[in-house]
Amino acid sequence: MNIKEVAKRAKVSTATVSRTINDSEKVRPGTAARVRQAIEELNFYPNTHARTLVSGRSRMLGLIISDITNPFYPELVKSFEDQAVERGQEVIIGNTDYNPKRMAGCVRRMVERKVDGVAIMTSEADPALVTELTRRNIPTVFMDTGKTGLHSANIRIDYAQGIHEAMQHLFSLNHRRIAFIAGPMNLESARTRRDAYLSGLKSRGLSDRSMIEKGDHRIEGGAMAMRSLLKLPHRPTAVITSNDLTAIGALGAILHAGLRVPEDISLIGFDDISFAHLTQPPLTTIILSRTQLAVTAFAALEALIRKDEGPHTDYSIPTHLVMRASTRAI
């Protein structure tokens, strides 16, 4: 099956078929509909490489994430891909596993596949890799780590808002020994969450850094950090964690120690992954909407690709506390 047979069936030229495949505005709607019908009837699959040569666009987008095993990211990937599919585009996904070498490999693969743009939804973007993308004028959208420019946009997550709401909630329940399990300190997003916790303590005249433990944004890291907190001379009455997987690990460690949530220790997560309301008790957490993040990232990327006029500004995603059953007054 080739393009000539499609042209013959639709009674148009091969050039018209090519323009239709590449979504050219030069083809009248009625003619384009006839060509698409012929394509469907003949079960014709366009040569994507040829389409790229004709249109100058691959109609492929890159999406780089940190950890595909974290339920936060599949939800983000699905929402982003839904946006792309609606517009006839493909998505190439790269998973860094928080590893700089894998990050470099992901970027190299995106460049080799000649993607039209890349959304880097991680917090460990290497400045050298960012330079490589911008040097090639590849439209790029970052999460927290990038700078706004002609070919780049940045989405800022307001992590502090959610942490401050969590601190206020716990203080209203009379908690004062509030601990924090942080994420990897090489991640800007993890540092921002920890700093918001510290500023919340400082604003209330508290500054006990012994209540901070480092996790790794995974369940086992949360369990290990929680076990360390339980060994303190004065154990915390409440714990805020850098993400929900950490909170789930902490919950397991608390229960294993013969304690209860929230009767003995209140617990708050971050992200509101799909499993958060299924824990026992259901987890109080801070919601960061993956759908809103994906839709914003896709829209920002499309604007860069289309080279929309006007200054590109930072985008912002809010975070807010969702109260369930893992916190209570003391």
Image: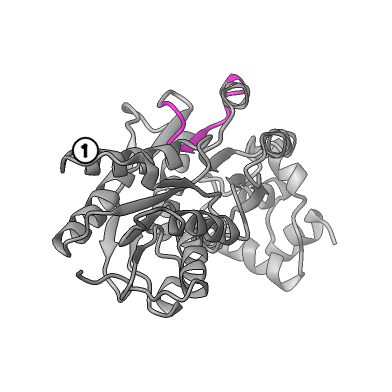
Q: In terms of depth relative to the viewer, which is nearer, 261 or 161?
A: 261
At label 1, the amino acid type is Lys
For image coordinates 37% across by 38% down, the residue present is 192
Determine which residue is flagged by label 1: 202
The answer to whether residue 288 shows anywhere in this view is: no
For image coordinates 34% across by 58% down, the residue present is 236
Spot occupied by residue 209 in the image (x, y as percentages of width and height): 36, 40
Left or right, 247 with reference to 9: left
Spot occupied by residue 196 in the image (x, y as percentages of width and height): 30, 41
Q: Residue furthest right?
A: 1
For image coordinates 67% across by 39% down, the residue present is 99
Q: Quadrant of the C terminus?
A: bottom left
Q: In terms of depth relative to the viewer, which is nearer, 150 or 187?
A: 187
Q: Is residue 69 magenta?
A: no
Q: In terms of depth relative to the viewer, which is nearer, 152 or 32?
A: 152
Quadrant in which residue 88 is drawn: bottom right
Spot occupied by residue 206 in the image (x, y as percentages of width and height): 22, 41
Spot occupied by residue 291 in the image (x, y as percentages of width and height): 41, 60
Q: Quadrant of the N terminus?
A: bottom right
Q: Which residues are magenta?
A: 135-147
Answer few, some or many: residues within 10 Å of disc 1's Cα (few below 14, many 20 plus, some between 14 and 19). Answer: few
Left or right, 195 with reference to 256: left
Q: Residue furthest front?
A: 233
Q: In terms of depth relative to the viewer, which is nearer, 32 or 73?
A: 73
What colour scheme has been applied to the protein in the rendered image?
one colour
Q: Is residue 142 magenta?
A: yes
For image coordinates 28% across by 70% down, the residue present is 327
Main secondary structure type of the part rendered in magenta: loop
Q: Secondary structure at mark 1?
A: helix
The answer to whether residue 187 shows anywhere in this view is: yes
